[in-house]
């Protein structure tokens, strides 16, 4: 089976990075209006209720599947599923931020989303450090 192809979730991609900021600072940014605009394309805050709908500036619709404060948010994004998670790093001022997207249509879409998430990480890191 090719890299990134799973039996259950189709094509998927995961990108993670250690950010030199405390977990609460990273979480508050990615779930706040500025961060949600950056990684999801929202105008306004990220909804937090299970089943809450959203629509991006690009017209992509989805809904919140789960929202665990200080831990992770999982949502549908068109036909795919995106999960954003934060975990403590090696010290209190380091946080591991992860973006994972599954149910992608093809290897090409997987590579496109890898580039997208790496660019998102660069922008988040620049905003926070």
Image (cartoon, rainbow, N blue to C red):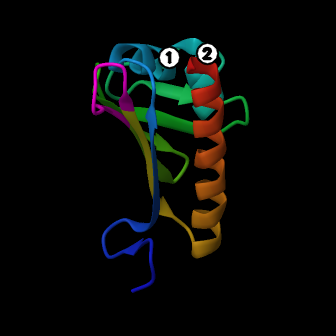
Q: Secondary structure at mark 1?
A: helix
Magenta-colored stretch includes residue 90? yes
The boundaries of the magenta stretch are 85-95
Residue 12 occupies which quadrant of the picture? bottom left
**89 sits to left or right of 102:** left
Residue 67 visible (yes or no): yes
**Coordinates of residue 4 in the picture (x, y in percent):** 44, 71
Examine the structure image and report whether residue 81 is included in the region drawn in magenta: no
In 3D space, how far apart are the residues under numbered discs 1 and 2 (Cα atoms)? 7 Å
Q: Position of residue 66 (x, y in %)?
A: 30, 32
Corner quadrant of residue 22: top left
Q: Residue at x 72, y 29 (%)?
A: 57
Q: Which mark is residue 45?
A: none
**Secondary structure at numbered mark 2:** helix
Q: Is residue 42 left or right of residue 84?
A: right
The residue tagged 1 is 29
Front residue (pair 128, 108) = 128
Callout 2 crowding tier (Cα within 10 Å): few <14, some 14–19, many ≥20: some
Reply above or below: 126 against 85. Answer: above
CB under 8 Å between callouts 1 and 2? yes
């Amino acid at each position: 089976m090719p890299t990134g192809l799973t039996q259950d979730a189709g094509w998927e991609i995961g990108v993670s990075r250690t950010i030199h900021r405390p977990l609460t600072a990273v979480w508050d940014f990615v779930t706040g209006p500025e961060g949600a605009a950056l990684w999801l394309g929202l105008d306004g805050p990220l909804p937090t209720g299970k089943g809450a709908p959203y629509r991006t500036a690009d017209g992509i619709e989805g809904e919140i599947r789960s929202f665990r404060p200080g831990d992770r948010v999982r949502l549908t994004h068109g036909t795919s599923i995106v999960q954003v998670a934060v975990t403590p790093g090696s010290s209190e001022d380091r946080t591991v931020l992860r973006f994972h997207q599954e149910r992608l249509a093809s290897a090409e879409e997987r590579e496109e989303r890898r580039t997208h998430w790496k660019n998102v990480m660069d922008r988040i890191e620049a905003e926070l450090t």
